[in-house]
Structures are given as structure tokens and as C-alpha cells.
Amino acid sequence: MSGNQLIREEEVKLLLWTDLIFLAFVYSGIKGGSHLYVYWFSTQAIVGLTLLGIGRAKRGSLTH
């Protein structure tokens, strides 16, 4: 695995873990009657997965 691919893989993992932090706020937001974090998490997840798909299509998969 080349250095660039390793860096991209680490960035993807960091992006996904950062997005998962918002899941902690989803439960407390719903419990408090707010749906802000549900919409925030959903939007961020959709945009992130879309960008990952575009990146994979343009640059190839992380393992090749």
C-alpha cells in the first residue's frame, strides 16, 4: 500500500468516526424534543457518503 493510499484511508476513518460522535447527541436531542441533531446527522452522513462515492469513482478504491 502506497503512502497516499494509507493517508486517504486514515482520513476516511477519521471522517466516519467524527460523524459518529453526533450520534451521542441524537438520543438526547430526541429525548428533549428537538430533531436538530437527527437532521444534522442525516445530512452530514448523506453528504459524506456521497463525497466518498464520488472520490472512489474518480480515484479508484483505497485498496488498489
Image: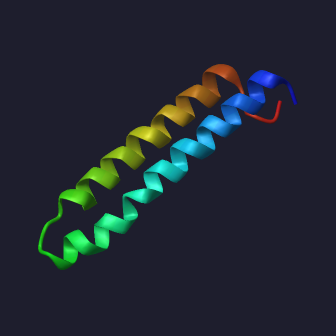
- The colour scheme applied to this rendered structure is rainbow
Seen in the picture, residue 42 relative to 35 is either above or below; the reply is: above
Residue placed farthest to the right in the image? 1
Question: Residue at (75%, 22%) from the top-left corner?
Answer: 4
Seen in the picture, residue 6 relative to 41 is either above or below; the reply is: above
Residue placed farthest to the bottom in the image? 31
Question: Residue at (41%, 48%) from the top-left corner?
Answer: 45
Seen in the picture, residue 25 relative to 46 is either above or below; the reply is: below
Task: State the quadrant of the C terminus.
Answer: top right
* Quarter residue 5 falls in: top right
Seen in the picture, residue 19 relative to 11 is either above or below; the reply is: below
x and y, in percent, of residue 15 in the image: 52, 42
x and y, in percent, of residue 44 in the image: 36, 45
Left or right of 54, for residue 64: right
x and y, in percent, of residue 13 in the image: 62, 45
Question: Residue at (57%, 44%) from the top-left corner?
Answer: 14
Question: Residue at (74%, 34%) from the top-left corner?
Answer: 62
Left or right of 12, for residue 29: left
x and y, in percent, of residue 7 in the image: 70, 29
How many tags in the picture? Answer: 0
4 and 48: which one is in front? 4
Task: State the quadrant of the N terminus.
Answer: top right
* Quarter residue 33 falls in: bottom left
